[in-house]
Image (cartoon, grey):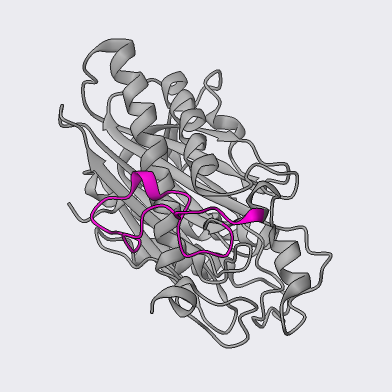
Amino acid sequence: MNNLITDIDGLKVGNATDLTLKSGTTALLCDRPMIASCMILGGAPGTRDTDLLSPEQSVQHIDGLVLSGGSAYGLDAAGGVQAWLREQGRGFAIGPVRVPIVSSAILFDLINGGDKSWSRQSPYWELGWEAAEAAAQDFSLGSHGAGTGAFTAGLKGGLGSASMQTDDGIRIGALVAVNAVGRATMGETPHFWAAPFEKNAEFGGLGHAKELPEDIAIPYTKLDAMRNAPTGGLPTGLGGNTTIGIIATDAKLTKPEAKRLAIMAHTGFARALWPSHSPMDGDLIFALSTGSKDLPNGDDGFGMLGAHGAATMARAIARGVYEATPAPEDPFPTWRAMFSS
């Protein structure tokens, strides 16, 4: 296993990155239509085709998912992915017509130092096409795709992924773009909130802080970091933040079970980011089932699946921040620039 969501058979991920724009798109493609649902807990989401993922809605399967920068403009990326899938003959059949089902979510990265002066049409449709075309088993983390221009409170964010396999052979994977209003580390220490779940030193192997900073009980958000930045940071009125992710498994799930898995995976947000699910976040998780393996032990097995999903999501969040790389005009440093020594 490569510690990526693509360790689950049938999934591929592609990134498209524009360094001048300081933004990008990440597309997850399903080799075949798959069960999916989602849960939104942030106060400011930006989405496309998420209503159809509710358990009571008719469409049961999707063809792909998109995470993108660009705020509402980034929703165009799903159109590019949809068009690419249409060329492959994919989609929900309605008579002679096929409509690829591609749900998406966006994060806010419009004032991160990149050049957003496009003219008549945003670049995100093309970025969506490029991401779909690049989809493969292996893909880059950190400042790539949807994580290109992402930031947390005081540190650069990024694209993260992680995976694990249970003793019963069930695989779980997470993919997440971390652009949180809160912190991924314990105060100004290098220690990640997700430390209890780390595997194989995947984000530094530092474990817990021996002592928590005195201000740890007071949420220190991205806006606070901007006000205190030596350069003045970005405009203090910025209210656009979001952590958007996907939790996937090869366990056979119903659509209501996928919804519950998405709900439980949000615990990973709460364990990896302080604070999370705020009015200024658009926090969302898609849940996806490839349906290739029976889930053992009934309700007990599903409960453990949700717990493992939350832990895997927390790990993916920390990896996204840990793997970030610097770019010109970044308002905050990367984790490695601050702490790698």
Q: Position of residue 186 (x, y in %)?
A: 54, 55
User: Can residue 178 be seen in this snapshot?
Assistant: yes
* Picture residue at 31% right of the left edge, 14% below the top: 300
Nearer to the camera, 106 or 194: 194
Q: Position of residue 230 (x, y in %)?
A: 72, 83
Report the predominant secondary structure element of the magenta stretch.
loop
Where, by quadrant of the figure, is residue 30 drawn?
Answer: top left
Where, by quadrant of the figure, is residue 137 drawn?
Answer: bottom left
Q: Is residue 323 above or below residue 7?
A: below
Q: Position of residue 144 (x, y in %)?
A: 44, 70
Assign the C terminus to one quadrant of the image.
bottom left
Q: Residue furthest top?
A: 298
Q: Position of residue 77 (x, y in %)?
A: 55, 60
Nearer to the camera, 37 or 267: 267
* Picture residue at 74% right of the left edge, 50% below the top: 280
* Picture residue at 38% right of the left edge, 65% below the top: 141
Nearer to the camera, 36 or 8: 8
User: Can residue 253 be seen in this snapshot?
Assistant: no
Q: Is residue 148 above or below residue 61?
A: below
Q: Is residue 97 magenta?
A: no
Q: Residue furthest right?
A: 237
Left or right? Give the position of 289 relative to 250: right
Left or right? Give the position of 201 relative to 41: left
* Picture residue at 38% right of the left edge, 39% below the top: 311
Q: Is residue 188 magenta?
A: yes
The segment highlighted magenta reads 187-214
